[in-house]
Image (cartoon, grey):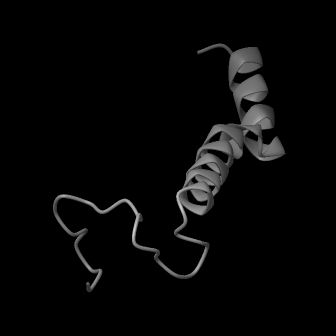
Amino acid sequence: MTALVRLRLAAFLRTGRALAPVLAGLLALATVGVALGGGLGRGGPRRLRLATPLPGLTA
């Protein structure tokens, strides 16, 4: 890699723009959960459920 490419990559990662797609995805998941009746902190009867539980989470 050239120094210019390295410098531009470091600047891109420092600005936080690298996290923008992740944050947008989390916001979309929260919005879908609220629209389905689950709410942010409580699950409604129509809440989406995972086929297998995630490790470290209790049901």
Q: Residue furthest left?
A: 52
Q: Residue 23 location in percent, x, y? A: 67, 50
Q: For this rendering, which residue is in front, 6 or 58?
A: 58
Identified at 81% across, 35% down, the residue is 11
Q: Residue furthest bottom?
A: 58
Q: Residue 34 location in percent, x, y? A: 61, 62
How many numbered discs, if any? 0
Residue 18 occupies quadrant = top right
| Whether residue 20 is situated above or below residue 31 in the rendered picture | above
Q: Is residue 42 left or right of residue 54?
A: right
Q: Residue 10 location in percent, x, y? A: 73, 36
Of the 4 image quadrants, the one containing the C terminus is bottom left
Q: Residue 37 location in percent, x, y? A: 55, 65
| Whether residue 24 is situated above or below residue 56 in the rendered picture | above
Residue 21 occupies quadrant = top right
Identified at 77% across, 16% down, the residue is 4
Q: For this rendering, which residue is in front, 54 or 44?
A: 44
| Whether residue 45 is situated above or below residue 3 in the rendered picture | below
Identified at 71% across, 41% down, the residue is 20
Identified at 68% across, 44% down, the residue is 24
| Whether residue 55 is situated above or below residue 51 in the rendered picture | below
Of the 4 image quadrants, the one containing the N terminus is top right
Q: Is residue 10 left or right of residue 39?
A: right
Q: Is residue 31 left or right of residue 4?
A: left
Q: For this rendering, which residue is in front, 55 or 49?
A: 49
